[in-house]
Amino acid sequence: MAVLCSNCAGKLIFNPATQRLECATCGSSFRPEDVEDKNAELHSKYYDTRVYVCSHCGAEVITSDTEASSFCVYCGNPAIVFDRISKEYKPDGLIPFQVTKEEAIKNIKARFHRNPMVPKEIMGKCVPENIRGIYVPYWVINADYTEADYLSGEVKRGKSKVTKYYSRAGEITVKNVPIDGSKILSDDISRKLEPFYLEDSKTFDEDYLNGFYSNTSDMTYFDLKKSAAYRCHKMFADEIVKTVKAKNVKIQDSIYWVDVYDDPIYMMFPVWFFTFKYNDKPYTILVNGQSGKVAGTMPWQKNRVVALAVTTFVLVMTVIVLSILGVINNWLLFASVAPYVLAGITLLGTYSFTRGISGLRRIYKNLRLTQSEDVFKYVKKRQG
């Protein structure tokens, strides 16, 4: 429920810039830990939230009643109506928002505004009204992890290459690994927001939620172990590949398991969500509410991409033609450097093509995450 100002009874909202609760009515400010919750003893393990429902897409939004919700953060429809009061289980702690909404917008624009491929109308949508701060549920775990891998790699044998196979196995102990607590939010996109710095965490106080949305974990312990195993596998695999002295090293098969020990710590981490639609497709850009790191990829204008590719091709062909003409018209002068020029053009073209394909693959992968309907509707509260 909303916490009121002790001076004028106005609603208090947490300001990331000052790390204080501020009253918009009289201007008073308070430290969250100094504001008393008179109902704390009545529900020490739970806190009250307000649930709003979108009549267009059916999404349920959890928020304190200090957040004036005028549109659905999932589908953008303005038909939001209050539904009920709900009690949610208290997390062990949280990392308060430290990046303001204005700073989040600035970071998004700094990353994409100068990209000529990004449609200008999208940046026009990057305004405070279209950005929402959401406390995302996380579990912080300690675990023992074991993995055995079967790998392949290419090595030189004379003038040819042969494929060799390797085996690796090991175990590690990991501490304070964050696992996002939602089955809908993609592990891949949540990892792109990291790191979060636990040294800034606070004991949970619902006053920090004032002015923000929040969500609760829908994971079972089995789900948590599965996500923890996958997360540890990604970390372990990245390092194990480096131990093989070969080219194009790939993991052919893996066996791994994780033992989570101690009680996992239930936390809330701050994330800004910028959601919009372009050509009837949903997009979500995320900003780490602690560090300001941006995750996600903007759509681009295909005609501009094609124009850039054609222009680059024409320039390369022009250089090649001029080189050939130089050989014909001034053979003695150019003959000594012609092989190097042509070799340089060939290497540059091959490198650019390879890098371009690799870059496009990364862009398409990020774009699929950014376009995810599940991420677009992430804050929807799930039952069961």
Image: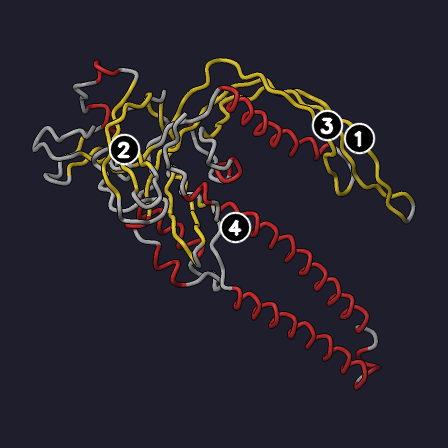
Does residue 278 lie above or below 166 as drawn?
below
Q: Residue placed at 24% from the left, 40% from the top?
A: 81
Q: Distance between the residues labelled 3 and 2?
A: 47 Å
- Under mark 3, the amino acid is Asp
Q: Which of marks 4 and 1 is nearer the N terminus?
A: 1
Left or right, 365 with respect to 351, comes to left
- Callout 1: SS: strand
Distance CA(mark 4)–CA(mark 1): 34 Å
Q: Quadrant of residue 206?
A: top left
SS type, badge 3: strand
Q: In this view, does 34 lie above or below 190?
A: above
Q: How many marks?
A: 4
Q: Which of 37 and 21 is in front in this view?
A: 37
The residue carrying mark 4 is 367
- Residue 51 - label: 2
| Residue carrying label 3 | 149
Image quarter of residue 90: top left
Q: Which amino acid type is shown beneath numbered disc 2? A: Val
Label 1, label 2: how many angstroms apart (C-alpha)?
Answer: 54 Å
Mark 3 and mark 2 lie on one chain; the one further toward the N terminus is 2
Disc 2, SS = strand
Amino acid found under the numbered disc labelled 4: Leu
Residue at figure coordinates x 62%, y 29% from the top left = 233
